[in-house]
Image (cartoon, coloured by chain):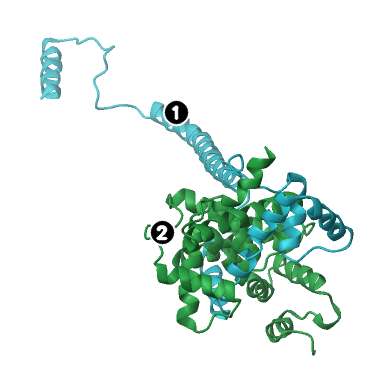
Amino acid sequence: MDRKYESPACKGYEALLEDSVSGEIGGSDAVRLSEHLKSCPGCREAREHVAPSSRLLRLAEASADPGPGFARDVMARIRTDKDVRVERGFWQPLVSMGWRFAATATVALALLVAYDTTSHVQQPAQETATLEAARIPDVFSPDPARVPSSRDEVLMMVAENEHGKH
Amino acid sequence: MPDVPKNVAASASTVAIPLSRRSKGEEERDLVRLAQNGTEAAFEELIRRHQQRVFALVGSILRRREDVEDVAQQVFLKVFISIKRFDLRSAFSTWLYKITVNECWDYLRKKKVRPLVYEADLSEEQVSRLDGIVSADRPVTGASEQAEIKETLDWMLAKLPEQDQQLLILKEMEGFSVQELAEVLGLNVNTVKVRLFRARSRLMDVYRRRTSPGTKPGAHSASAERKR
């Protein structure tokens, strides 16, 4: 943009010319510029060219103050907007992810401990039940080791087996 | 408290700061510290003090009134969120204006909004009226003339590169100092002065092209040609 710019002013004096046009020059800078202007028609021309710019721009009024209503609106938004109230720093996503992991790990650990405890409690009960069962004689089941001594006993055993299948 | 503005005094009573014996800078630092500790009244006071300049800054970049208010609100919300991280090494205003400029560019990028472009040319009547005011050095009278002048100036500014527009508006219309502009734009003071001078020159090219139809654009650069 500035490459295309063609100014008759000397490059080393543009900042001083700006001070002069905006009325913010004084002391040694003013003397230096005035000495330079005596011998430089380019800088004189450039200063004359831009001189009315301040007057031209100041014809427009500055933007109006938005008034106290604006500050009130912003504060109302701050009070209602939860996202604004909670400061979200750089580490916030990592911290919340860490909490989620911690919660999941705690639940998993609790389940494991509970499972472990219940399995230890159930094991002796099962063993006791088996021993108790061993002591009671089974009067209903036929003894497989017993050999029938007569034909009637054989027929009874066959009849019992057939009855058991149905 | 004779020197204390009414609104400052009002909020000072809420946030309990003895403002009368403090300089403006110290006062502002106190307000910032209170806002950092969560005092909402202090933050509201900071908004009141800076809202006009934030509006001016946003307006100089966006140029649309309806967008200006939204973006200005967003700026203060961001400031509220991050005020605890502000270390008070620079002035609060410098930090605030930097956030404002960044928010504006973010907004333009997200919305893919193009800067305001004036398709229609100025009427001869408008041009001669403006020339009459400038050359006769007479004040602008009445709201309609003011509105017309504003329209004419907006038209001329729209012909300039965006950075030139921003510099000229902030310096001449909104009263920012060169130092403030340098801080806001992250430039050297000398660079700001050079850019301002060149922006003025381009503006006057546009102005002379419209007010003196016989004048060629950049006619003042004849001496530049001679120099080369």
Give the amino acid type for the residue marked by disc 2 in the picture: Tyr
Residue at 47% from the left image edge and 75% from the top image edge? B147
Residue B93, above or below B202 = below
Q: Position of residue A24 (x, y in %)?
A: 77, 64
A163 left or right, relative to B207: left
Q: Position of residue B173 (x, y in %)?
A: 61, 68
B90 left or right, relative to A132: right
Q: Position of residue A123 (x, y in %)?
A: 49, 32
Of residues B65 and A98, the one nearer the viewer is B65
Question: In whole angstroms, how far apart are the C-alphas of marks 2 and 1?
Answer: 101 Å
Instruction: Return the chain for callout 1.
Output: A
Q: Position of residue A50 (x, y in %)?
A: 64, 59
Residue A109, above or below B70 = above
Q: Which residue is mark 1?
A: A131
Residue pushed farthest right?
A28
Residue at 14% from the left image edge and 12% from the top image edge? A154
Of residues B151 and A161, the one nearer the viewer is B151
Instruction: Return the chain for callout 2.
Output: B
Chain identifier for the cyan-coloured part of the image: A
Give the amino acid type for the residue marked by disc 1 in the picture: Leu
Q: Quadrant of residue B179?
A: bottom right
What label sits on residue B199 in the rendered view? none
Q: Secondary structure at mark 2?
A: loop
- Number of the front mark, 2 or 1: 2
Residue A25, above or below A39 = below
Residue A148 visible here: yes
Badge 1: few (under 14), some or many (20 or more) residues near its Cα, within 10 Å? few
Dots 2 and 1: beta carbons under 8 Å?
A: no
Badge 2: few (under 14), some or many (20 or more) residues near its Cα, within 10 Å? some
Q: Which residue is mark 2?
A: B118
Chain identifier for the green-coloured part of the image: B
Q: In the image, are marks 2 and 1 on the same chain?
A: no
